[in-house]
Image (spheres, rainbow, N blue to C red):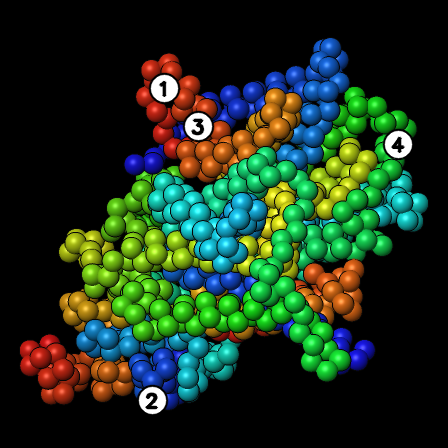
Amino acid sequence: MTLRRAQDDGAQRRRWVVAAAGGFVVALLLPRLGVPTFYVSLLTQTWIFAIVAMSLDLLVGFTGLVNFSQAALFGVGAYAVAIAATRFHLTAFAPVMALGIVSAMLTAAIFGLVALRSEGVGFIIITIALNEIVWGLAYQWVSVSGGDNGITGIVRPHVGPFDVSANTGYYYVCLAFFAISLLLLLLIVRSPFGLVLKGVRETPRRMRALGYNVWLYRYLALTISGGFAGVAGVLFAWYNQFVGPVALSLDQSTQILIMVILGGIGTLYGQVFGVLVVVFLSNELSAVTQRWEMVLGVVYFAVVMYAPGGLVKLVPQLWRRLLGRRPALATEEP
Amino acid sequence: MTTEPCLVLDRVSKRFGSLSVLEDVSITIRSGERCGIIGPNGAGKSTLFNIIAGELPLTRGTVRFLGHDVTRVSAHTRARRGLARTFQTTTLFPRLTVIENLVLALQAHSAERFAMFVPRRRYRARDEAARALLERVGLGARAEALADALGYGEKRQVEILLALAQRPKLLLLDEPTAGLAPSDASLVTEMLKREHGGLTMVLIEHDMGVVFDVVDRLTVLHYGRVVADGPVETIRGDATVQEIYLGGAL
Amino acid sequence: MGLQFYVQNALGGLAYGSLLFLIASGLTLIFGLMRIINLAQTAFYLLGAYVGLTLVAHGTNFWLASVAAGVVTMALGLAVYSAFLHRYHADPLTSLLLTLGFALIVDDGILAFWGGDPRSIAPPPILAGSIHAGTLVFPEYWLAVIVISFAVAAILFFALQRTMLGVMIRASVDDEEMARGLGVDVNRAFYVVFAAGAFIAGLGGLLGGPITSAYPGLDGELTPLAFAVVIVGGMGSLSGALVGSLLIGLVNAFGKALFPELSYFTIFVPVALIMAFRPQGLFGRKL
């Protein structure tokens, strides 16, 4: 039985909000607390990838679309920055951010026309192919993308009056974008439109019978998701100051999906934890062993088989078991 | 006030490869009529529903709904024009609450379904309308439960509520009382009988008790063809129909 | 652009396409039967190439080494399938991620064991020459590869159409529930198909070596092509895999010759058209 109790809900909600606020404050203070710049840098990466992970969760967790081309959308945003900077000498913050978002959304819009002709597994296969098309372009169209060598020398612009070329400055930029993205996405999923997406995820047949144009809502979700992925891509290009085809490879799409699963599909606020684990794990592992990719593969295995509900479900479960309490009842979605 | 019939099927045929499931089905249903479609299993009744609703393309023939040819019109557009249905297997949104299920039905025709940056809490009227619907059938207490947690009979009731919430002009009900205990079945029958106001109903049923209680007209399908069509009492006494049901009097 | 250009590229394309068939046939059959998108197929191919070339370097006969390589990949594939994958055959997402994780592990293992330098693989001495037909010149080995792949295709078709096992497999693809209900040992069919797919891919690795060489990342480059094949041909269709692979092989060859910077893109134009207008592929059924 999966009943919910209104009172428990209110209390739990408040606890989460407090925790989130606390977390945000800690995140704000971290660079000032003497944390080494290396870790500040890793956290910056975390904010960036959390944005793209959440954008994918919008599709996977809320619309029921397993999109294997999220890296392509992310990468298009990144390459837009790189190409704009190195070929058109366009480096100003706002126009380039807008360009990145628009490019990614346009790509998503094109993808949607092709991929949304299918559902379920067919959709997965086609998005794999779409990702490979974009990757192929980045890999081979050397005159535009720099091929395997990518594009280097991307300069980080000033954000308004602020010079964010230093790690700390940029950390705050990415944190801000992450927070705004999280809030916007939470709004979207709790809106009437968000409920439509959930309906589409649960039972598309019923939605059609009720009069909803299911294709249209999937299309809108894909395009919106693309926009957020574009934001992450732009931030990534400025963070890395280099963009290469790896950023939009199938491996990257998989990694983003693993982050989403690890964080908890359909949670949005859980994604940042999934990203945190993957980012820190990859970094710590590569310092310890040359075979870190193999270990990562094993981690994928483990996550997919043993923690499909993600950390957001796993950690409280383990915690409760440790403390000897009864398992919690199912809770509502955001 | 138009005297166009609500639904006109003109020589509708459906083949799957060489298998003919429906052959030359022609039915005219006027507004406000309650029509029952009966026939042995495999007669093509659910296929007919899927064609009327637009989920399945037909091989030959036309479908006219409220005076317009909808043969090539998509399912969701037909729904928007006033066609609602229930499915043979309960088709709800399992991991959403009962209230959310109904809100989806209620907001389907309103622009608010595109509202992205406004929390649903603001649309109090919808929530209240949904609750009111639930109260009417005594399911008010289950409003916050996940749809999947409901009992089978309760789910069937919600299934019908979803269709009714669309304020349809034509309601297709595919075996609404299938698998229900007699008490639940009579609840459903009462729900259906209470609906007035020009709602046209087409009902597929095997339970003759329900059929005779709710409808005024019967169409009998056998091997994909219409073998009898007329007022309930006439069909009841029809020899061919009695034979189809293996000699038992209806 | 003389005759030489066209014949050269056409034959090269057909040879390459034949290699793609060895990968795509497994991919499409595994998907058709088990609904598993096996992203480790190309990794099996690469592993087969490396295992094969090591055996050849130790004096093994080329053909024997190919078969042995296939056996190795088959064993590995069976191990993964029986240990993990078989539980998730109805779950496309999980199985896909598992095969991807496995591919990562295999790729890194190859890097660790054989290092990052590309390895060239010589064709067997008998077929090391070229054929001269008038003004045309092309490697004998290309023809050999085409012939071998067609032979494999013929065996697969025969197995599916004429053997009891083949009937079981086709029945299970058609309607798994029904097949189980009729007493068909569907699980056995699963194991056989997965094993066959892994074997053929591994076999293809060494066979294809003289054409593609072997280097880490080759599998990543082959994956988009394999997917192009199954999308065009239709997931689950063997005929589709055959037609699709030859088609993609040809488009790839001419694409590389005419538009080297956009050859992946040129391949994907027909793919995109199919995806837009006939998503089930040329021979596939609606997914």
Q: Which residue is found at the position 41% from the left and 33% from the top?
A: A306
Which amino acid type is marked by label 2? Asp
Asked whether disc 4 touches disc 1, contact meaning CB atoms under 8 Å apart, the reply is: no
Q: Which residue is more in the foreground, B204 or A111?
A: A111
Across and down, in percent, residue C12 comes to 66, 69
Which amino acid type is marked by label 1? Arg
Asked whether disc 3 touches disc 2, contact meaning CB atoms under 8 Å apart, the reply is: no
Q: CA distance from mark 4 to mark 1?
A: 49 Å
Across and down, in percent, residue A102 comes to 76, 51
Q: Earlier in the sequence, mark 4 or mark 1?
A: 4
Q: Which residue is mark 4?
A: A158
SS class, disc 3: helix
Q: Which residue is mark 3?
A: A314
In the rendering, which numbered label is found on residue A321?
1
Q: Are marks 4 and 3 on the same chain?
A: yes
User: Which quadrant is the C terminus of chain B positioned in?
Assistant: bottom left
Across and down, in percent, residue B134 comes to 35, 48
Q: CA distance from mark 4 to mark 3?
A: 41 Å
Q: Are marks 1 and 3 on the same chain?
A: yes
Q: Which residue is found at the position 73% from the left and 20% from the top?
A: A38
